[in-house]
Amino acid sequence: MHIHVFESNQRHGEAAAKQAARAIRDAVAACGHARIIGATGASQFEFLDALTARTDIPWAQVEFFHLDEYLGLPDTHPASFRRYLLDRLLTKVPMGTAHLLDGEADPEAVRRDVGSRIASAPIDIAFVGIGENAHLAFNDPPADFETTDPYLVVNLDEACRRQQVGEGWFPDLDAVPAQALSMSVRQIMATREILCIVPDARKAEAVRASLEGPVTPDVPASILQTHPNVTFFLDRFSASRLSPDTTPWVTD
């Protein structure tokens, strides 16, 4: 587990993008293509801006998978993660293939279809965040650490839904969908390399619990402690509750 703490969001986004670009290039060099997973949300803004600005990524050889999407939300809605990915990634780079989750279609059919595609070969790199309730993708606590299904239909807890209101995606709690399609914890953990990108003070307690607490479904992102190749990109606010005495980390 590698932890990097940065003074600014711009710097932490640039550093994460640099490592992501290296991982994509390495995968393409090794087998001719790269299979990646991407997150959405406010925490990924600086990272995606830096990633799409780079000119050293062979996007045409990249196959992209979507982490999660609200059920019943049209892609015209400002909170739609399909819309987010189109606006912030897929219209900015010449992506080879992208598998987006259609939240308006039959969820069982979508999860089976995209699930079969992602399970067809190993995933090289995943870009993820951590929620205010320590969720990983939309796996809210207590998360299912056991299922082998690549995608699940999940119920969103109140803390998760309040985060979406607080970030400005929805006007109030009633407007936030109660369910979503989410990549499962085990599917995320099967990735060869994970970059976990988590800025902002409101994530500080979730970061502390995920990195320094016990591994438990009650803190879904704590499972990342068990991954052999994970790097955390934090800012000084999200890292503010970490203890340098118990968790090795470096400041950039």
Image: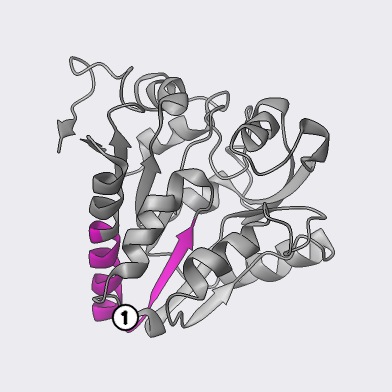
Q: Residues within 10 Å of mark 1 (few under 14, many from 20)?
A: some
Which residue is under mark 1? 58
- Prevailing secondary structure class for the magenta stretch in the rendered image: helix
Q: Which residues are magenta?
A: 18-38
108 or 89, nearer to the observer: 89
Residue 34 is inside the magenta segment: yes
Residue 120 is inside the magenta segment: no
Q: Is residue 178 above or below residue 241?
A: below
Residue 99 in picture, x, y percent from top left: 60, 72
Mark 1, secondary structure of its residue: loop
Residue 1 in picture, x, y percent from top left: 26, 38
Residue 31 in picture, x, y percent from top left: 31, 80
Q: Is residue 171 left or right of residue 217?
A: right
> Is the image coloured rainbow, by chain, by secondary structure, or in one colour?
one colour
Query: Going 67% across and 35% down the picture, which residue do you hit?
Result: 165
105 or 46, nearer to the observer: 46
Q: Is residue 145 above or below residue 87?
A: above
Whether residue 229 is visible: no
Identify which amino acid the numbered label 1 is placed on.
Pro
Whether residue 40 is visible: yes
